[in-house]
Image (tube, helix red, strand yellow):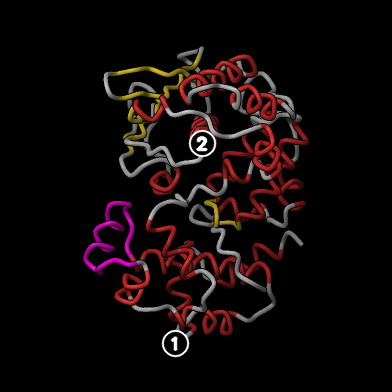
Amino acid sequence: MQFTGKGTISVCFVEGLLQGVRAQGFDTDELLEQCGLAPAILRMPNARVTASTYTVLLRLVAQILDDEFFGMDSRRMKVGSFAMLCRAAVHGKSLEKATGRALRFFALCLDDLKGELWHQGDFLRLRLRHNDPDRPPPVFAQETLLMFMHRLICWLVNRRIPVLAAEFAYPQPLHAGEYRLMFAQNCRFAQPATALVFEAKHFSLPVVRTEKALKEFLRIAPENLLVQYRDRYGVGASLHKLLAPLPPADWPTFETVAERLGSSASTLRRRLEGEGLSYQSIKDNLRRDRAIDLLSGTDLSVMDIAAELGFAEASAFHRAFRKWMGVNPGEYRRALAAAE
């Protein structure tokens, strides 16, 4: 089995996605089993699932509900709506006009949640509002709309538009650590409104994408919108790309990595710290994700997986996996097997 390096997804997002399914009266246990996941996974708050499994689940939910907003709003966003939204946005002359078109389209499709652009001097907020102050939209709905919009605006101008700060009108959730990768290092909770803060100058950029490019963008949706949230332009992504194809035993030293990237070790360390990362955290996350791939996609023994991941002893792998997931490797594999 070749490791894809696409990463893993917190089970908290699986739980968030299933809220809309339950609200429509569907059997979520059966849906999970179709994706090869046992309901017991949801009782492991630190658990993670492969990106490919989560993508399958996203597509199944959208098809079953005929709703590309996954049952998170009182009105369905019927399948095909997002493609029309993108076709409207891609003809905007500037990023601000294109973003405005996308937000207006969302406002036509959704009843409970609305996005708007708000200028504040040199800054621009993409702010969410909800119609009923006494019934705020689910956290997953707010996360989804922000992720949809941020990925779309980056794609439209073919460059990363940095998020200076992310503000949320709800308390810090259990999976808040994921937000540093999803949105920004600077995340604030229990704020007056949910919003992403940008430098306004980016929104004068011209839209460079075409209808032809849009076909490929839509072909891999929603994975490119809700799954691959690693910043592919950052130095952390460069290290991830360098290490992912290699077995852990062949991972180079930090000094060697810096040299390969044309940087000094001190400069590379400083740039990683700016992204909230370290060389060790990147290696740990790769080991974690590869462990999940091997446990879910192969029949290798736990001892063999420990060796594959570069652990000298199986006991060291057990300790690391429990730290990552809250359960030991055998428990996690048995939970997966229960869905088969």
In the rendered image, the vertical position of residue 2 relative to residue 42, given as above or below: below
Q: Is residue 339 left or right of residue 203?
A: right
**In the image, which is nearer the foreground, mark 1 or mark 2?**
2
Q: Which residue is mark 2?
A: 147
In this view, 33 is above or below 155: below
- Counting from the top left corner in percent of width and height, residue 272 is at 31, 58
Asked which secondary structure carries label 2, the reply is: helix
Which residue is drawn at the image coordinates 39% and 48% (left, top)? 177
Amino acid of disc 1: Ala
Q: Position of residue 145 (x, y in %)?
A: 53, 30
Q: Nearer the viewer, residue 255 or 165?
A: 255
Magenta span includes 117: no
Residue 312, numbered circle: 1
Q: Amino acid at mark 2?
A: Met
Q: Residue at x 51, y 76 (%)?
A: 246
Which residue is at 41% across, 69% downward?
283
Q: Nearer the viewer, residue 283 or 334?
A: 283
Residues shaded magenta: 262-278
* The disc label shown at residue 275, or none: none
Is label 1 in a helix, a strand or a loop?
loop
User: What residue is rendered at 62% in x and 46% in y?
Assistant: 223
Q: Earlier in the sequence, mark 1 or mark 2?
A: 2
Residue 322 x %, y % = 46, 67
Residue 236 % position (x, y):
39, 58
